Amino acid sequence: MEDLYALQEQLLEQVDVKERYLLSEIDWNERLISIKGARGSGKTTLLHQYIKFKLGKEYTPLYVSLDNLYFLENTLISLAKEFVLLGGTHLFLDEVHKYPHWSRELKLIYDQFPKLKTVFTSSSMLEIYKGESDLSRRAVNYNLKELSFREFVLFEKGYTLPKLSLSELLENHGEIAKTIKKDLQNPLRDFKNYLNYGCYPYFLQGQNGYLQKLVRTISLIIEVDVNAIENIPYSNSIKIKKLLVAIAQSVPFTPNISKLSERLGMSREFLLNSIKILNRADLVMELFKPTKGIGALTKPEKLFLNNTNLILALSRTVNEIGTMRETFFANQFKNLNDHEIHLAEKGDFLIDRKHVFEIGGKGKSTGQVKGLKNAYVVRDDMEIGSLNIIPLYLFGLLY
C-alpha cells in the first residue's frame, strides 16, 4: 500500500493543468462512477487532475492502475478493505478491463463499503452490464470523447471558445462566428491543424511524432484492449487490424460483406462482429439510415473512421477533403447523449431525425437540400455564414 501511495505522489507531481471538458460535467458525489473512452483520450490525466485540483484536502484518495504488479499478489477487494481501514475516502481505479474479475469485485466494494466513493476508467469497448456482475444500476456512466476543436484551441492557444448547444449554433451562427473571427484571427488555419493532429491530448508532446504515436495507439487498442475485453486470440486481432486498414483505404466505406469476408478470410458473423468491435473501440463509426434497425448482425450503410487524425494515420492514399469534412461532422455528434445521427435520404446527415445537413466546400450550393424543412448547408473554407449556410468549424464547439 505504501508503494501505491508513493507512486500516486510521483504521478500527481506531473499533472497537466489543461482540463478536459468532462472534468466539470461529472457528478463526483456519486458512489460509483464509470469513465469510458478511447485509449489516449485522457482518462488517466482526468483522474489525476480531479485528485490534485478538485478534491478537498480533508479527503484521502488513492489512485492505482489495475495493471500494477501489486495485483499479482493482491485482490481489488482486499485493497479496498485495507484502504478503508486506513481512513481512505476516494478510490480511483484506472483501466479496470485489465483486471480479470473487475465487475464482481467492484460490486462487492460498492455493497460492503457504503461510505467509499469509487471511480473507475476503462476502454470505450467495455460494456459494464456484460461483466460477471451487472453494474448498470450501481454505476453512473460517462464517456470521454476525443478533443473537440473547442478544446484544441484552448490547449494550443489558451483561447476559450464558447460551448454551444445545437439550437444556439443553428440560430445564432452568424454572430458567433463574427465574435470568434475577431478574437481568434484565423479560425480556418486552426481548424485545419485540428483536423490534422488535434484529436488526442498528446499532440501537446509534439507534432512531429504525433501520427506515429497514434499508429502505436491503434495497435495497442486492437492487440491489447480487444484481447483483454473480448478474449480474442492474436491471430484474430491481426484479421481485425486488416479489416481496419481495408476500411481506411476507402472511407467512407459502404461494406459489401460477401466480398469483404472472402477477401479477408472471415466468416460473415466474425466480420460483422469485428466491425462492431471497431466501433466500440472508437476506431470506426457505423452509420445507418433512420428507417433501418440496428441489430447485432446488421450491416451498416456506411463506415467512417472515427476521426480525421485516424484517416491521416491509416490511409496510404491521398485523403479526400470531402471525406475529412464528413468524418469531422459525424464525429462531433457520435456519443453525444442528447443527439443522434443518421444518414439522410437527401443531403448527407440527419440529426435527431429532424435536421438535414449537406456538407461541402465553400462553393457548395443549397440545391441538394432545397425545399426541405430544417435543412442546412455546412461549408468548409468559410469563416462566417448566413441564413442556413453554416461554417463547418463551428460544429467543433458542441462540447
Image: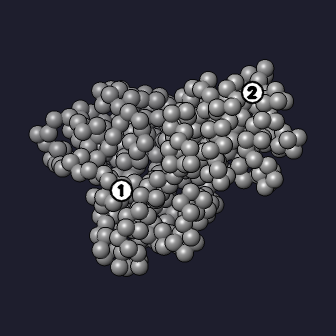
| Residue denoted by label 2 | 89
Q: Which residue is situated farthest in the left direction here? A: 371
- Left or right of 107, for residue 337: left
User: 146 or 124, which lies in front?
Assistant: 124
Between 197 and 184, the one nearer to me in the picture: 197
Question: At which x and y percent is residue 397?
Answer: 44, 35
Q: Is residue 387 left or right of residue 217?
A: left
Q: Is residue 224 above or below residue 176?
A: below
- Provide residue 49's location: percent of width, then percent of height: 69, 34
x 52%, y 63%: residue: 313
Q: Where is residue 230 drawn, in percent x and y? A: 53, 60
Q: Mark 2, residues whose alpha carbon is within 10 Å: few (<14), some, or many (≥20)?
A: some
**Secondary element type, mark 1:** loop
Quarter that holds the N terminus: top right
Say few, some or many: other residues with alpha carbon within 10 Å of mark 1 (under 14 / 14 to 19 / 20 or more): few
Residue in view at x 24 percent, y 46 percent: 290
Vertical arrangement, residue 146 with respect to residue 278, above or below: above
* 365 versus 373 height, above or below: below
Numbered label attached to residue 296: 1
Q: Using the rendered view, name the quadrant where residue 301 is placed.
A: bottom left
Using the numbered discs, state the Cα–Cα distance from disc 2 to disc 1 in whole angstroms: 40 Å
In this orientation, which residue lies closer to the viewer: 228 or 133? 133
For badge 2, the amino acid type reads Thr
Earlier residue among tags 2 and 1: 2
Instruction: Relative to 67, say whether 243 is above or below.
Output: below
